[in-house]
Amino acid sequence: MATTGVMRPGHIQLRVLDIGESVHFYKNVLGLVETGRDPQGRVYLKAWDERDHNSVVLREADSAGMDYIGFKVRDRATLEKLDADLRAYGVGTERIPAGELLETGERVRFSLPTGHVMELYADKTDVGNGQPYTNPDPWTPQAEQGIAPVRFDHCLLYGPDLEGNLKLLTEVLGFSLVERVLMEDGKSDLAIFVSCSHKAHDLAFVRHPEPGKLHHLSFLLQSWEQVLRAADLMSMNKVSIDIGPTRHGITRGTTIYAFDPSGNRFETFSGGYDFYPDHQPLTWTFEEVGTGIFYHDRKLNERFLSVVT
C-alpha cells in the first residue's frame, strides 16, 4: 500500500490519575523516552526507535482513559484533502493550531461514530532515535531501558456503531478491513480490525454500549523472546497483568496485556502478518471468539471483556 494518505498511528493522549507515578511507570518500567513537558502539565514520551518527537502524551485527570488518538498523514496537501473529504461526508472537523501539542503541526480533529476523538496531522519534529542518519548503529542504550518497545503501534477501542466507523474509515480515510468477528446472528460485527498500512491492524473496535472507551493501547516488541522478557519485568515491578504471555488467533501476534498505575490497559506484542489491500478479510465466528483472541487458552477472561477506561 503506497503511503499517500493516512500513514500510521502517531500519538495518543492518555488521562492518568497521578502524573508523577505515571511518568515513572512509562519511563522506567515500560521504557519510553521523555521528550518534553508543556505549561498545561502534560508529559511527552516516545518509544526509543520512533523518530517523531512524541507518541504518548500523559495528562493528569480525575478519570483514566483516552482523550484522542492522532494519525500522521503523508503531507500537508493530504491533510487539506482529507479535511475536505470528511466535511463533504458530513463529519464536522476542528482545526487545532500548530504548537498546541509540543513540536506538532496543525491538527484536524473529529469524532468517530463510536464516540472516539481522532485527529490527523502532517508535521511533527523529527528528533531521531539517538543514532545519526549516516552510518548508524542498529540500536541505542535506550533500547535496553525497561521493556523498551520500538513504537506505539495501535489501539483497541470500545463503542457503538461499528458500521458507521467502518464506513467512515474505509470510504473516506482509506483504511482496509483486515479481520472481523461476527456476533451470534452471524451477520453483524462484534469486532473489526482495520489497517491504513501493511500491518495486520492499526485500529480495532469492539461493539460496546458506552461510547468513547479505551480497551488498550499497544506497543510493538521485536520478538517473542522480548515479550517473555516484558513479562519478567512486569512481575519484577509488580505490574497488574491481565493475561499472557500468549498468542492471538486474530492478527497472529504474541502478547501480554497489563495495566498502568491508573488502570489503563496496555499491550506489549510482537509478530502478526503483512497485509495488502487485495487480501480478503478474515472472519471469525462468534463461537470461536475465544480462540480468536487468546489462541492458547481458547477462552476469554471476564476482566478482558469488561474493564475499559
Image: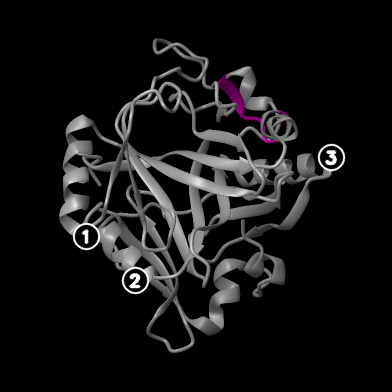
**Where's residue 115, x and y in %?**
43, 59
- Judged left or right of residue 178, residue 303 is right
Q: Nearer the viewer, residue 28 or 295?
A: 28
Q: Nearer the viewer, mark 1 or mark 3?
A: 1
Please give the range of residues in magenta.
28-37
- Judged left or right of residue 112, residue 142 is right
Q: CA distance from mark 2 to mark 1?
A: 12 Å
**Where's residue 153, x and y in %?**
49, 44
Q: At label 1, which amino acid type do we have? A: Glu
Q: At label 2, which amino acid type do we have? A: Glu
| Circle 2: element type | helix
Q: Which residue is mark 3?
A: 236
* Label of residue 171 in the image: 1
Q: Which comes sooner in the sequence, label 1 or label 3?
A: 1
| Circle 1: element type | helix
* Label of residue 163 in the image: 2
Q: At label 3, which amino acid type do we have? A: Met
* Label of residue 12 in the image: none
Q: Is residue 259 above or below residue 114?
A: above
Q: Please tell me whether residue 30 belongs to the stretch shown in magenta.
A: yes
Q: Please tell me whether residue 164 belongs to the stretch shown in magenta.
A: no
